[in-house]
Image (spheres, rainbow, N blue to C red):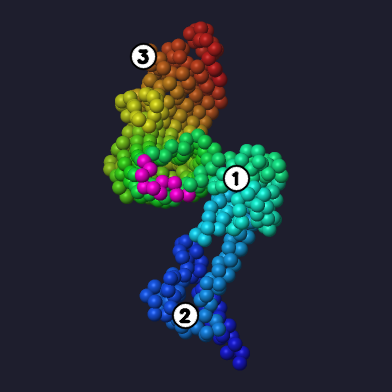
Amino acid sequence: MNAQNSEQILNNRLRVKTFIDVVRWLAFQGCAFTGHDETFDSKNRGNFLDMLKLLASYNDKVGKLVLENAHKSSKYNSPQIQKEILEVLAKKVRNKIREDVGDSQFCIIFYEARDESKREQMAIILRFVDVDGFIQERFFDLVHIKDTSVLTLKNEISAALSLHCLDIQNIRGQGYDGASNMRGEWNGLQALFLKDCPYAYYSKFLTPPLLGRNGKLQLLDLLSNNLTGTLPPYICFGNRLKILNTEENLLVGPIPNSLERCESLSEIRMGRNFLNGSMPRDLFSLPNLTNVMLQSNRLAGKFPIFLRNDSKLVILDISDNKIHGELPSWIWRLRDLQILNLSHNYLETLDVNLNSPKTSQSSFYILDLQSNQLKGQLSTLPLHFRDDYFYHAGLTRLSSIFFFSVLRNKFNRTIPTSMCNATLLEGVDLSNNLLIGMIPQCLIAMNLRVLNLGGNNLTGVIPDSFSEDLLSLQTLVLNGNQLEGELPKSLAKCNTQLEVLDIENNRIQDTYPLFEEHRHVASPYFAI
């Protein structure tokens, strides 16, 4: 008898587990459960029953316990059972969201609409900062309401929050979509919440979840607003969107994966938001994409290992994020790439094929890798800079600034003389690395405006190769090295433009004034 009872218990558990798995999968995919005709002879009994039938065909144990093989008193096929399982899952999700919110402040967002039965319903979304410092936006509850009057909405929202011990005093923002009375400045819902909590400020937010779904959208420019929320997944429906600009807003969440299939895109500008997650794998392979600007977000993960297609990228700016791992070689195969800014990330290593003949095809105007954790030799980087002036439609003015920076990394060995081949280079910052050896004479002879080699382990003397023809030098920083000898006398030729000369914490031995010409310099900054 005990063995029979134990077997029955195991069978019941397997049956219920199968039902729960089907309900969870259908709910996650947003699929309908029931069908128009669920009778045994129907060719389409609905997703729930047909999914059970599919699972039963692969598992004999399941097949003996579900559908027509189940005991008449425990089939568990009814819509009521399905709803009860859904409600259990919904409670577990809400409890997890409530746990993540904790006692911290949060924002409330509401969508009001009618369902298929014409009943008013209200979706409640919570926005909060999790324990890792990321902004999260979670669908929390769906409440049916008898009308959209202000008091009804206020009472329903307050009841839903109180049920989960969410204190109204912790609200730090509110946003709405739907009924017009939800936007009233004085007598609307936001005014009532402001009365209860003076910090529950109203803000606009990105409301249409089907934005771009009409298939005709070609340009979307939302620059510099207070838009919050996440980007809708169907933003490029119809594959006609060419320019997407959401810079300088308060958007959260990941970049929609659907963008990597948007072959019409030429410009993506999403900088200065709170986007997180990883970058879509094939985003940089889009055939018409020229500008990608994702700076100042919270993007993480790694670069894709390879590109699916050739790319026309001209500008790539992913600075000030949390990208880590390897700096891939495919970036240097982008023939059109002119501006590359990957500064302020957590990049660690260089691709071993980075400087191969097949890889080294890019020629930059700006190459900014500062504030990462890159290590190895500078000679590994293909340092090719363009020898012409630059104008691109993505920028507003002519640019003649040719800039290279690896400030605050872990590069070692000597400074490669190949850098001197970039004759129009105007700014070089190699400071705060582990560089050794002597300063290349050709580097001093370049017509630079800024040269910063501070915070390394450079030795020897400063080359005496400042030329009368090179009158552009404004900043020369050599501090924190082991340089010795006297200051080069040819440095006096730079007096007309020199604004900063910093040679502190070295072994320089000279007299001050360093040379007669320094008596006539108008208030430069000297650090010796």
Q: Magenta part mainly helix, strand or loop?
A: loop
Specify the farthest residue to the bottom.
Answer: 1
Pick the front one: 422 or 245: 245
The residue depicted at 55 percent of the width and 46 percent of the height is 177
| Closer mark to the observer between disc 2 and disc 1 | 1
In what element is the residue under mark 1?
A: helix
Residue 96, image quadrant: bottom right
Q: Does residue 172 appear in this view?
A: no
Q: Amino acid at mark 2?
A: Leu
| Closer mark to the observer between disc 3 and disc 1 | 1
Depicted 163 relative to depicted 299: above or below: below
Query: Where residue 404 appears, x then y in whole percent?
Result: 41, 31
Depicted 49 relative to depicted 287: above or below: below
Asked if residue 501 lies in the magenta stretch, the reply is: no
Q: Which residue is mark 3?
A: 469
* Residue 67: mark: 2
Q: Which residue is mark 1?
A: 182
Looking at the figure, which quarter contains the C terminus?
A: top right
Q: Is residue 140 left or right of residue 408?
A: right
* Residue 475: mark: none
Query: Where residue 169 appears, x then y in whole percent?
Result: 71, 46
Q: Earlier in the sequence, mark 2 or mark 3?
A: 2
Q: CA distance from mark 2 to mark 1?
A: 47 Å
Q: Which residues are magenta?
A: 209-218
Q: Residues within 10 Å of mark 3 (few under 14, many from 20)?
A: few
Query: Where residue 234 appears, x then y in whole percent?
Result: 42, 50
Q: Earlier in the sequence, mark 3 or mark 1?
A: 1
Q: Is residue 252 left or right of residue 359?
A: right
